Image (cartoon, helix red, strand yellow):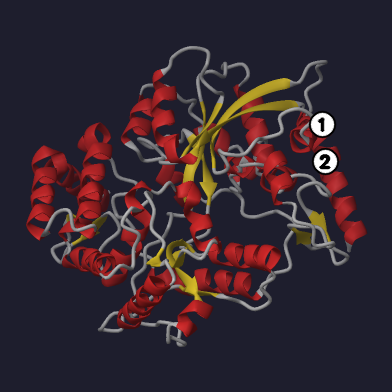
Amino acid sequence: MRKLLSLFLALVMAIGMMSFAVAEEEPFVITVMIPDFYSTEDFQTENNPTLDAIEAATGVRLQVNFVANSTYGDSINTTLADKTEKQPMLMALTDARGASIINSARAGAFHDLTDYVHDAENYPYLAAGPEGVYNNVSVDGRIYGIFRSRAYPRAGIYYRTDIAKEAGIEKEPETIEELTALAEALAAYGKEHDAYALNMCSYTAGTISIITCAFGAPQNWGIDENGNIYPAHEDPAYLEGLNWLRHLYEIGGIDPNFATIDSTNWDNIERTGKAYMRFDCLDNAYRQQEWFEQNEGVTEDIFGMIGGLKKADGSITIWPQNPGFQGEIVVTKAVSDADLPKVVKFLDWCNGPEGQMLLNWGVEGETYWIDADGFRLESPESGEDVTAKVHLIQHSLNQLGMNVPGDLCIPMKLTALREEYNQINLDYAQYAVSDPCYPLTSETNIAFGTTLSQNISDAAVQYIAGIIDEAGLRAAWQQWSEEGGAMMTEEYNEAYHASLAE
């Protein structure tokens, strides 16, 4: 199988070179700005085997500007405001529906890619993307970015099953009440071991959304019994979720400094035994498991995953970490009209099997390996720890990956946890709570949405930490309404009802 696989990859590369390589002495340089999850580590820019392989296959030399994920949102706004030639040609936008992004698209900051993504003859991989997902990232019916595909629904709860057993909990929680019992037991155990039950950091949106949706709150916006749009925080279940976190904080189950902990330290908190449970992307569970196997010699599964929790009435509602994608890659006006087809052709190649492998996994023998059965390995069969080497060469290049037509990479032989994760996504997709306003436009949201959302988030964090009481929380909600929230709700209702009439 390995020989056949190598032949296939060689053929793909040959076809890519014949159809796409730039017949110039100098490579065509494409500048890129993407978020970085390894900002404290170096990235090998000279003689980088992945960048060299991309250039050999396409004639394109990538010049990558990595920006720390913790400050990436601010960097996007700063970069978009810079009208000089310093703008990157390709940018990863992590919030495709953010006000500044929609405003920038309307102002002409990005190339309109609508016709390109529908041109299956010249851009087959881009054209293979689901129309519904392209619709979700569109602005006024036009497509300005290539969505970065993500597993759906993906989010959930994972925890240390070995620690849970030591704390007296052996059964995997199936209800919210059982989750509460687990969290309280882990909090008590953590007090004795200088640790916390729940791993929370400055990225609080996911944690709050997972628990509030579990109680039955909408995702951002909901539809009431009269068929009208309303904000999630007005649902009683939203406050129930916040009260759950506030209770866990009060009993010492959450680090009191959680709001100032950078998200880049999130993984390390679990790896050093300082927290036992996390509300986040479930695929982190098997990654953490594999880290413990490779670095701590763990031989048994020590992480459990919870895809959804039953409420008192038996229903399940879960927060999807994404609507089938996480952000998009846009082509800025730093690219000339003449060069645009060439850049879009490169993006199409990025979504093919060779492009996906190089961006997501790098080069065989350097950042991934193939076993005798043709399966991809993340480390050599010798067992050598190559984490530092992979970070040096590959770093966060996968943030440029889009996988529009689906995952075309060489598959891995799945562990039990990876198989369980895939099955959870299949089983619980039906319970994912969708946001009815996602494809709709509110002018107030475009102008003030980011600030208004941040105010709701800040109030939630202050409430969880006991800085404000329920009266203070409701006062913040009222202020949100007065400063634009009510108008935004009205505009979304108009757009929603108009869409129903179409």
Element marked by disc 1: helix
Residue in view at x 67 percent, y 47 percent: 360
Question: Relative to residue 408, is residue 75 depicted above or below?
Answer: above
Q: Quadrant of the N terminus?
A: bottom right
Residue in view at x 40 percent, y 24 percent: 78
> Taking 414 as reference, is 164 left or right?
left
For label 2, the crowd category at 10 Å Cα-Cα, with few meaning under 14, some 14 to 19 and many 20 or more, is many
> Taking 299 as reference, is 318 left or right?
left
Percent coordinates x, y for residue 288 in the rendering? 58, 63
- In front of the other: 117 or 428: 428
The residue tagged 2 is 13
> Taking 231 as reference, is 254 left or right?
right
For the image shown, how many numbered marks are present on the structure?
2
Residue in view at x 23 percent, y 57 percent: 465
- In front of the other: 427 or 279: 279
- The amino acid at mark 1 is Ala
Q: Residue furthest right?
A: 3
Percent coordinates x, y for residue 163 in the rendering? 49, 78
Question: Relative to residue 32, is residue 150 depicted above or below?
Answer: below
- The amino acid at mark 2 is Met
